[in-house]
């Protein structure tokens, strides 16, 4: 029996900025329903790689596939990546993104932040979207904040709204770019609890994080990056118990 198609498949991905190679020959398959944590030192290319998955950063070469369908565009005869805007928009609607600094719309309430994209992008009926949004806010412990504006929320609450906004699009995958790094320590736990719940529910998650305990306990797979390359891919328990590369051992120590 053939292996199922990965939720995300990355083939020979490279990214350059002004002639400087930030990512080089990245190959990675992420199975559906799994949580993958991307670890590595600062400047290793983790966040750039994450942003290449939904083409917030357009790869210089290589390809990304979502459920077997190529994201964004093709490589032409000259080796340059070309963008199909319509197809990219359709694909991005299936990939949720949670940023380090929340990126909420300040002029909209919590409920409006969560419902705006499904109504405007997916053209779903407002009543259906609002019913779903309230269920999601209940799930993350924020139903009582539905009509509050972001300025009245704590950092942890803002990040839970951002996660709710991603979930409201019913994505295939959610990408998290250091979702707890901008939070006070006492607020980190409430965000990680939501992500743990998503992992248990089978949501495909790709997470750039410095939360080592979370990565060890929740992720199925750890991807260790350094110098713009993937240096090691291993089941989380194996990686933390006995990393195979000297660079990973030094990182963990």
Image (spheres, helix red, strand yellow):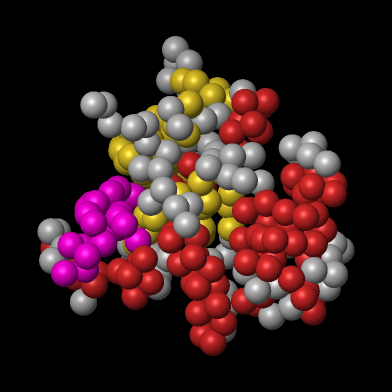
* Residue 246, horizontal then vertical, whole percent: 13, 63
Q: Position of 98 compared to 5: left or right?
A: right
Q: Is any atom of residue 24 visible in this view?
A: no
Q: Position of 135 compared to 74: left or right?
A: right
Q: Nearer the viewer, residue 186 or 15?
A: 186
* Residue 54, horizontal then vertical, whole percent: 54, 41
Residue 166: within the magenta? no
From what the image shows, is residue 67 above or below residue 229?
Answer: above
Q: Quadrant of the N terminus?
A: top left
Residue depicted at x 65% and y 74%: 141
* Residue 155, horizontal then vertical, whole percent: 65, 77
Q: Quadrant of residue 118?
A: top right
Q: Position of 156 compared to 125: left or right?
A: left
Residue 223: within the magenta? yes
Residue depicted at x 43% and y 20%: 79
Q: Position of 165 compared to 217: left or right?
A: right
* Residue 41, horizontal then vertical, whole percent: 34, 65
Q: Quadrant of residue 138?
A: bottom right
Q: Quadrant of the C terminus?
A: bottom left
Q: Is any atom of residue 72 visible in this view?
A: yes
Magenta residues (range)? 219-241
From what the image shows, is residue 21 above or below residue 195?
Answer: above
Residue depicted at x 59% and y 33%: 91
Which residue is situated farthest in the top direction here?
A: 77
């Amino acid at each position: 029996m053939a292996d199922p198609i990965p939720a995300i498949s990355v083939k020979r991905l490279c990214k350059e900025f002004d002639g400087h190679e930030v990512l080089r020959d990245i190959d990675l398959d992420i199975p559906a329903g799994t949580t993958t944590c991307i670890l590595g030192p600062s400047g290793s290319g983790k966040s750039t790689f994450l942003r290449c998955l939904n083409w917030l950063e357009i790869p210089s070469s290589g390809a990304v596939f979502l459920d077997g369908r190529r994201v964004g565009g093709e490589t032409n005869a000259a080796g340059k990546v070309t963008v199909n805007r319509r197809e990219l928009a359709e694909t991005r609607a299936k990939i949720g993104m949670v940023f380090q600094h929340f990126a909420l719309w300040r002029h909209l309430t919590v409920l409006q932040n969560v419902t705006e994209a499904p109504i405007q992008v997916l053209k779903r009926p407002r009543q259906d979207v609002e019913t779903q949004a309230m269920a999601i806010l209940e799930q993350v412990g924020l139903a009582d904040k539905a009509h509050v504006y972001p300025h009245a929320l704590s950092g942890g609450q803002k990040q839970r709204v951002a996660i709710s906004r991603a979930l409201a699009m019913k994505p295939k995958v959610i990408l998290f770019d250091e979702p707890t790094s901008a939070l006070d320590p006492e607020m980190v736990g409430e965000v990680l609890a939501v992500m743990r719940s998503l992992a248990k529910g089978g949501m495909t998650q790709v997470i750039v994080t410095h939360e080592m305990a979370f990565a060890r306990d929740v992720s199925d797979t750890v991807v260790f990056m350094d110098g713009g390359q993937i240096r090691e891919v291993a089941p989380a328990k194996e990686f933390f118990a006995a990393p195979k590369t000297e660079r990973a051992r030094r990182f963990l120590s």
